[in-house]
Image: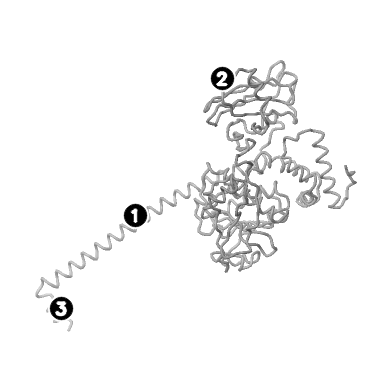
Amino acid sequence: MVVPVDSPGSTDQELYIQLRNTFLENLNSNGNYDDYEESDLDRIRNDDKYCNRFILHKKGVLEDALEMVDEALRWRKSFGVKDVTLAALPLEFFQAKAVFPFNKDKEGNPIIMILVRYHKKAPEFAKELRRFVIYWVELMEEQTKGGRMTVVMSCAGAGLSNLDLDLIKFLITLFRSYYPDSLAHILIFEMPWILQPAWKIIKAWLPEDFVDKIKFVTKVSIQEYVTADNLPVDMGGTNTTEYIPPTQEDINNAINGTEPKRVHFSHNPESLSDIKGVAKENGVTKPSQVVITDDYTVIGGILKISPATHLLFNNQSEDETNDVVIKLSNVSEKSISFKVKTNNIESYRVKPSLGVIQPGSSIEITVILLPDYQPLPSDKFLIMGMEISDPTLSTPALNTLWKSTSSNMIADHKLKCALKNGDEPSATAESELEKSLKNLNLILTNLENRIQTLDAKQTSILFRQTISLCLTVFLITMFLGHLFFHTDSFWPSVFEKYF
């Protein structure tokens, strides 16, 4: 049943109904069901509280809330949030005890604790670290049933090598854009003075109401938000609870589909051990899992696609074609068959649109925008890939194989079309923030190297001073010993003169 849209001035209850109906009407009109997970669409259809959270997050502005719904659901699909499970994450991440849930704040919101001192910046693991953080956020979402949570980021005992501005920005982006009305506070505990300039950069990027959620706290001021009995001792509290990571047995249980022990705490029977997650289906990572970076996208762990999200075309010249290249690379150990489709076959030509890529090899696909056409915001290219056992299949045989293969075995990703300097993603404040953070990270790295150099020089100077002092004491001792034992007239003359 479709509920009619009311006039402006509606209450929050009416607004969330309008949000649901408008989003679903747009979905039916565009037919872009593949852009979202079916489970997320079901949540929009059936969960009133979830829909209303978008309205609350955007202060009752329906248009902004609709935009956030679309952005959040697309991100959940592209990031592969539903595949982030206990069985899909490295056990070492849990054993590091750097991120875990820990008690509740004064408002009853569960806390996600991040101990920065156990974190090491490693770009090659950045994606997995983000998935690990999302794992806990999703569990908190399930536990609170759409309530709020608090993040405590403890910088105590951390050095420059532990501090990760990109992780801070990722956390802010999560709660700002993808998890509506779910953040109570981000408490940054004992942040070093060296990172204060970074906060000024981040603050300029955030809306004022979100800035108020981020608090810099000490052992004293943190108790304005969390009571002492819910804080660990090293943060000024009295709680001796210790987080115990899952074991390999828990991972195996998750793979086998049996209920794992999700979260363990010693001395705390009323912990979060009742949280349940969703294990990987049949213990196999689905090929729909997508890893997106600035430069490329990897789908299903088998096919690397460049560019990552958009095909950017030049403005058309008369009677000239407009070409863009898509580079596909096989990152699997098996041969990959690829297929490229578009929803606007009148405006584009693709060469080749079907083929095989050997392990470790790449292929370039040319996408031609025909004369007298311009790329539309709705234009998309679907890049698909699947592993095959016979790399010598002919084109007709490949077509037959694609028609008979289940969609569960196919990894896919959509590329949008845009004009350069037109409707392409512009250099927004967020991209400026990225540049600033990268520059700041570079400065911090250089500063860390200089500090290490100075420490080495200081150690060398102290060593030299110690050696000099020891030599001086030794020489003085030798001199006095010589006078004492070898000069018969020295001591009598001293006593005769002064006594």
Quadrant location, the N terminus: top right
Residue at 51 percent of width and 45 percent of height: 122
**Quadrant of residue 293 in the image?**
top right
Callout 1 environment at 10 Å: few (<14), some (14 to 19), or many (20+)? few
The picture quadrant where one finds residue 499 is bottom left
The residues bearing labels 1 and 3 have C-alpha atoms spaced at a distance of: 43 Å
Q: CA distance from mark 1 to mark 2?
A: 65 Å
Colouring style: one colour
Residue nearest the observer in this picture, 354 or 328:
354
* Position above or below: 429 against 423: below
Where residue 304 appears, x then y in whole percent?
58, 31
Q: Amino acid at mark 3?
A: Val
Q: Earlier in the sequence, mark 2 or mark 3?
A: 2
At 65% from the left and 52% from the top, the residue drawn is 276
Residue 285 coordinates in the image, percent (x, y): 61, 39
Which residue is identified by label 2?
Answer: 392
- Amino acid at pointer 1: Ser
- Within-10-Å neighbours for mark 2: few <14, some 14–19, many 20+: few
Look at the numbered discs 1 and 3 and tell me whether their residues touch, using CB distance below 8 Å: no
Give the vertical position of 298 relative to 486 (above or below).
Answer: above
Do labels 1 and 2 touch, CB within 8 Å?
A: no
* Amino acid type of the residue that numbered disc 2 sits on in the rendered structure: Thr
Report helix, strand or loop for mark 2.
loop
Say which residue appears at 80% left-offset and 47% top-offset: 46
Q: Which mark is residue 460?
A: 1
Which of the two discs, 1 and 2, labels the residue nearer the N terminus? 2
Q: Give the residue number, with chain letter if any, for mark 3.
A: 494
On residue 424, the disc is none
